Image (cartoon, grey):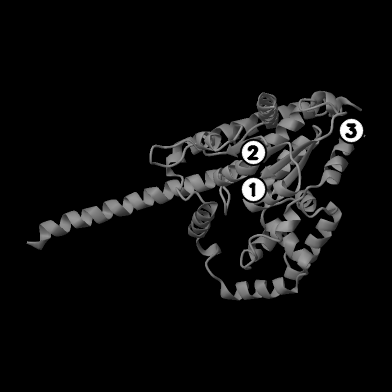
């Protein structure tokens, strides 16, 4: 029964090694849903409910991509991105329901995240195609910069 | 002579109070929108996936609405709810608390639910001490299960969290309800509200690098 792979098939064919994704979000229902969606598309998802746990996980294991929420108790997503960028070039997708920051100047959280080194952003709520597309896009971008720097 | 000074002051106080009220109202709205964005994201992800794979649903046998159409309508409604949420977020983005922090949002929601449920929640010392006493009787696992139930997880989600079988989760749940003498889940959660539960369980149980679990899950579909 290969229909699943056929309908999904966006990230990679089933013969390739699974895509390792780290989701950092205190909202566990989002984490579980992302895991459910990716597990059907040859993705392995690790979940960290806090920035600190996510940073630890990144130090101990290798991930192909990180998906992170902006608002979390403790260290915020924006700080975490900056922190990760000091050590790693792993592609980072930032997600949030709220896009604009309160005054002054109503700054854009996503723009701030991109400045700190995020690869792309996803506005919550998002659909599976949007998630897959964001992952594909940031992997492609990372691959491109990788070939440039080599 | 004090009158002219007093009047504007009083007016200013009224204005301050109404500004305060409207600020609180928009903070409540944005806190609720923030809390909604998680579950709605999850809902949209699940429903879209069901819809994408609805060609695998059994063919309709002529009775009632075919599952495929139900999936289609569910997706449409979920998308509509998501659009509504984004509208709310757009209108109250400017009111989103600067120190963003969820902690603040949660406080506002707690305040709000106390204010709106009227006499349902105000401190009931007897119920609280009874609930806390019963809580002490729970095993460590049962406490974890209770925490997950209070967070609104279903049996299946809770079981996935703890990496146990849903049946086991259900039996933990049944035992907790027995201990609390709760007739149903709502009653159980209402009692649990009195308990000073640690907000977060053991963080280690949450960090699940589960390659095996993922493989098990996907092999369910692929086998």
Residue at disc 1, secondary structure? loop
- In the displayed structure, would residue B115 be above or below residue B126? above
For disc 3, the marked residue is B222
Residue A10 spot, x, y in % from top left: 76, 25
Residue B160 spot, x, y in % from top left: 79, 50
Chain of residue at mark 2:
B
Chain of residue at mark 1:
A
Task: Please indicate, yes or no, whether residue A127 appears anywhere in the rendered image.
Answer: yes
For disc 1, the marked residue is A27
Q: How far apart are marks 2 and 3 (CA)?
A: 25 Å
Q: Which of marks 2 and 3 is nearer the N terminus?
A: 2
For disc 2, the marked residue is B41
Q: Which of marks 2 and 1 is in front?
A: 1
The residue sitting at 16% across, 56% down in the picture is B7
The residue sitting at 70% across, 58% down in the picture is B203
Sort mark 1 into few (<14), some (14-19) or many (20+) by Cα contacts within 10 Å.
some
């Amino acid at each position: 029964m290969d229909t699943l792979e056929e309908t999904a098939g966006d990230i990679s064919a089933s013969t390739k090694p699974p895509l390792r994704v780290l989701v950092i979000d205190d909202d566990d229902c989002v984490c579980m849903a992302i895991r459910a969606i990716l597990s059907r598309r040859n993705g392995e998802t690790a979940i960290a409910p806090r920035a600190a746990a996510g940073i630890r996980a990144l130090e101990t294991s290798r991930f192909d991509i990180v998906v992170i929420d902006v608002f979390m108790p403790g260290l915020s997503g924006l700080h975490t991105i900056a922190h990760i960028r000091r050590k790693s070039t792993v592609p980072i997708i930032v997600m949030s329901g709220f896009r604009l920051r309160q005054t002054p100047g109503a700054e854009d959280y996503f723009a701030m995240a991109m400045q700190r080194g995020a690869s792309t952003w996803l506005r919550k709520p998002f659909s599976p195609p949007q998630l897959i597309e964001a992952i594909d896009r940031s992997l492609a971008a990372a691959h491109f910069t990788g070939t440039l720097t080599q | 002579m004090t009158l002219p000074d007093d009047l504007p002051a009083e007016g200013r106080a009224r204005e301050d109070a109404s500004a305060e009220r409207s600020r609180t109202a928009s903070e409540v709205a944005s806190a609720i929108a923030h809390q909604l964005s998680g579950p709605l994201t999850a809902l949209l992800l699940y429903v879209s996936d069901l819809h994408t794979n609805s060609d695998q649903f059994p063919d309709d046998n002529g009775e009632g609405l075919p599952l495929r159409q139900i999936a289609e309508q569910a997706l449409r409604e979920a998308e509509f709810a998501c659009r509504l949420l984004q509208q709310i977020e757009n209108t109250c983005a400017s009111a989103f608390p600067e120190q963003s922090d969820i902690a603040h949002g949660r406080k506002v929601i707690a305040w709000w639910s106390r204010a709106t449920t009227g006499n349902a929640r105000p401190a009931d010392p007897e119920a609280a001490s009874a609930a806390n006493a019963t809580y002490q009787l729970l095993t460590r696992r049962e406490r974890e299960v209770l925490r997950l139930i209070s967070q609104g997880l279903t049996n299946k989600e809770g079981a996935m969290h703890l990496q146990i079988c849903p049946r086991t989760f259900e039996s933990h749940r049944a035992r907790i309800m027995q201990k609390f003498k709760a007739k149903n889940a709502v009653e159980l959660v209402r009692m649990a509200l009195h308990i000073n539960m640690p907000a977060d369980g053991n963080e280690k149980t949450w960090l699940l690098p589960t390659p095996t679990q993922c493989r098990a899950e996907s092999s369910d579909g692929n086998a």
